[in-house]
Amino acid sequence: MKNTLLLILVCLSSALAAGRIYVSPMGGNNAVGDSWATATALHTALSNAQAGDEIFVLQGTYLTSATNDRNESFTVPAGVHLYGGFQGHEYSMDDRDPAIRSVLSGDLGQPGQPADNAYTVVRLNSRGDYGSTLDGFVVSGGTARNFLEGFSANSAGGGLYIASDGTSASTHMIYNCTFQNNLAHNGGAIYVDGGRPSFVSCIFTENKADFNGGAVYNQGVEGDASPIFRNCHFEDNTSNSGAGMTNNGANGSARPLIISCAFVNNFSTLNGAAIYNLDNDNGECEPVLEGCSFVGNLSVIGNDVSDLGISVSISRQAKENGGGNLSPTKRRK
């Protein structure tokens, strides 16, 4: 009985502690942030936020760094919910215009020149059962091209890097976001390092990877990478392989669920213009596709299949005017 009462008190205290922070492009670092009139800076809000808190972000553009520090990102703490697209008069989610976006940009230094941009624009960290939310943003200008750092946030996931320790049960939610003009060695827009984030009604366009995953790279090396993509649109992304998406089981597993998504005019110089699957080493790669469409995707070499060692479930797909849309799993020894 005592343990039950203690659990109830802990849950109630956590709920009561949850708050809301208001953010503006002009917000000062010392502003309170408890209303639009006292809106604070985004980095300040993220530093002060605790699990369960909401951050309402006014429309406008937010740079990752005020000092052109390429290593700075917008790091969302585990369990914090970040909502963009507000006009400054709303005090509930229901009042927000869903067509409006706030812009999170890594375009530092000289505008339009990626060489001095932030490595990664947004980072989501996983801890226990705490999942974070990213809703109503354009994420652009990340350039994760530090070749010496492997699959770190400085070389993968120019737009968004989702970190996992391989054991976290947290589920991040990414809604109504556009990832555009991001670059990386792998995962031009998104790098999923394990976990099970959900992407709903998101757009991935004009992102580029030097190697794999022009838009998205799902990596199972830290355990299980099981993201869900629902009603998402992948267009005009480029890479060597998997311009739309690369799934790599590595030493763990990659099991993405891809539902009602469109892959349009993506281009790979090697394999799988839309989707490229790998089950390297002892890993497993088992993507499931339902009701997706593939239009105008192109691979220069085409589908290079050396081993269909795992299961790729594909149902109700539409294909049109393209070659190399899907590259079945290739096992590399």
Image (spheres, rainbow, N blue to C red):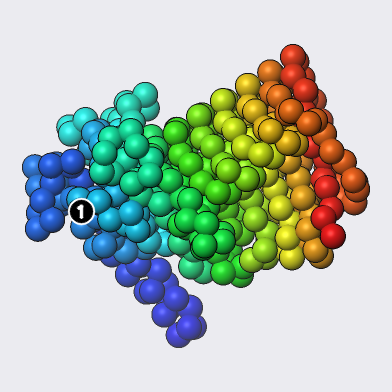
The amino acid pointed to by label 1 is Thr
Task: Return the x and y of residue 96 as percentages of the image width and height.
Answer: 30, 30
Residue at horizontal 73 percent and vertical 60 percent from the top? 250
Task: Return the x and y of residue 249 as percentages of the image width and height.
Answer: 74, 56
Residue at horizontal 33 percent and vertical 33 percent from the top? 112
Task: Say if 305 sits above or below 194 in the image.
Answer: above
Read off the residue under disc 1.
67
Q: Nearer the viewer, residue 138 or 241?
A: 241
In the picture provided, is 171 more to the left or to the right than 108? right
In the picture provided, is 27 more to the left or to the right than 268? left
Task: Return the x and y of residue 214 as percentages of the image width and height.
Answer: 59, 38
**Element at label 1:** loop
Among all residues in the image, which is located at the extreme top? 321
Task: Say if 131 sits above or below 115 in the image.
Answer: below
Q: Nearer the viewer, residue 315 or 8?
A: 315
Mark 1, other Cα within 10 Å: few <14 / some 14–19 / many ≥20: few
The quarter in which the C terminus is drawn is bottom right
Q: Nearer the viewer, residue 279 or 89?
A: 279
Task: Return the x and y of residue 313 as percentages of the image width and height.
Answer: 83, 40
Residue at horizontal 48 percent and vertical 67 percent from the top? 127
In the picture provided, is 145 more to the left or to the right than 320? left
